[in-house]
């Protein structure tokens, strides 16, 4: 292990993971990040960012899929080592997970270890990204598990194997669910809402999707909390 003295901890860039339904604008959030970006598209949905001039796009080809673990790893290492890349985006991790699991299942003699192998690969991938000192943005689809709890709130989670999700997102500083309410996009960062969420960057628990990167001042956070209460009341009425 490497040790750092008090006050001399290494600085690292933030890692963001946002999951949500299709059409909620997950991919377009990449526009908020500053600097040159490398977009790895696993679901071929990149039209939302095609008009930008600072994104290098990597799209899977058919020949990549049978060896996707090696293809993704090698190209991510290249992006990590490139001085011309500031932000790395993985869009969409749900699709990537499905490809990886497919490959593991085809190669395995004992399927009981398949999910363990997948969890390890995603854990190693997240470790590579964390050590890169690049800003990381990843997306995934969402699952609505229905109504539960005394307040009948829906419980949402990323469309991933839960242990794989935990292994991958343990390295991330922010995990949130993006959704649309009354025509406006929101990102829920509050684990008390019984959705998979966290925010280690600041103390915001509900944000406008357009403010993912820029932390709000304290008075603005208070306003966001008021908005949350209003949305909860609307949900109970609806």
Image: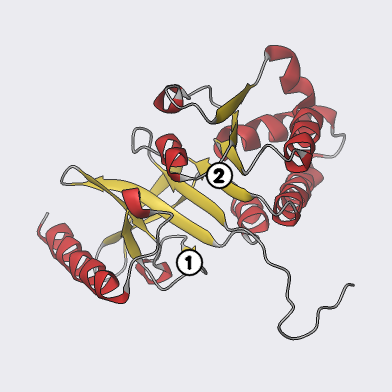
The residue at 78%/51% (across/down) is 124
Is 105 positioned to the left or the right of 24 in the image? right
Under circle 1, the secondary element is: strand
Indicate which disc, 1 or 2, sits on the residue closer to the N terminus: 2
Q: x, y percentage for residue 170?
A: 64, 62
Type of colouring? secondary structure
Residue ID for mark 2 = 138
Q: x, y percentage for residue 121?
A: 77, 46
Mark 1: few/some/many CA within 10 Å (<14, 14-19, 20+) = some
Q: Nearer the viewer, residue 51 or 101?
A: 51
The residue at 65%/53% (across/down) is 168
Under circle 2, the secondary element is: strand
> What is the quadrant of the C terminus in the image?
bottom left
The residue at 55%/46% (across/down) is 137
Is 2 positioned to the left or the right of 90 in the image? right
Residue ID for mark 1 = 199
The residue at 74%/19% (across/down) is 64
């Amino acid at each position: 292990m490497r040790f750092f003295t008090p006050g001399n901890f290494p600085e690292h860039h933030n890692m963001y993971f946002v999951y949500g339904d299709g059409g909620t604008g997950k991919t377009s959030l990449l526009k908020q990040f500053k600097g040159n970006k490398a977009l790895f598209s696993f679901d071929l949905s990149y039209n939302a960012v095609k008009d930008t001039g600072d994104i290098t796009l990597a799209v899977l080809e058919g020949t990549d899929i049978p060896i996707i673990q090696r293809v993704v790893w090698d190209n991510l290492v290249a992006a990590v080592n490139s001085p011309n890349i500031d932000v790395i985006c993985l869009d969409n991790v749900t699709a990537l997970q499905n490809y990886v699991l497919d490959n593991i299942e085809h190669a395995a003699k004992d399927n009981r270890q398949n999910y363990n192998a997948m969890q390890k690969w995603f854990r190693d991938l997240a470790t590579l990204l964390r050590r890169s000192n690049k800003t990381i943005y990843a997306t995934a689809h969402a699952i609505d598990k229905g109504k539960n709890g005394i307040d009948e709130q829906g419980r949402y989670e990323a469309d991933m194997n839960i242990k794989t999700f935990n292994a991958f997102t343990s390295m991330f500083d922010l995990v949130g669910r993006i959704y649309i309410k009354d025509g406006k996009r929101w990102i829920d960062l509050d684990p008390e809402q019984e959705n998979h969420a966290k925010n280690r960057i600041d103390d915001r628990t509900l944000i406008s999707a357009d403010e993912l990167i820029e932390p709000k001042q304290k008075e603005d956070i208070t306003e966001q909390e008021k908005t949350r209460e209003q949305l909860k009341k609307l949900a109970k009425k609806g």
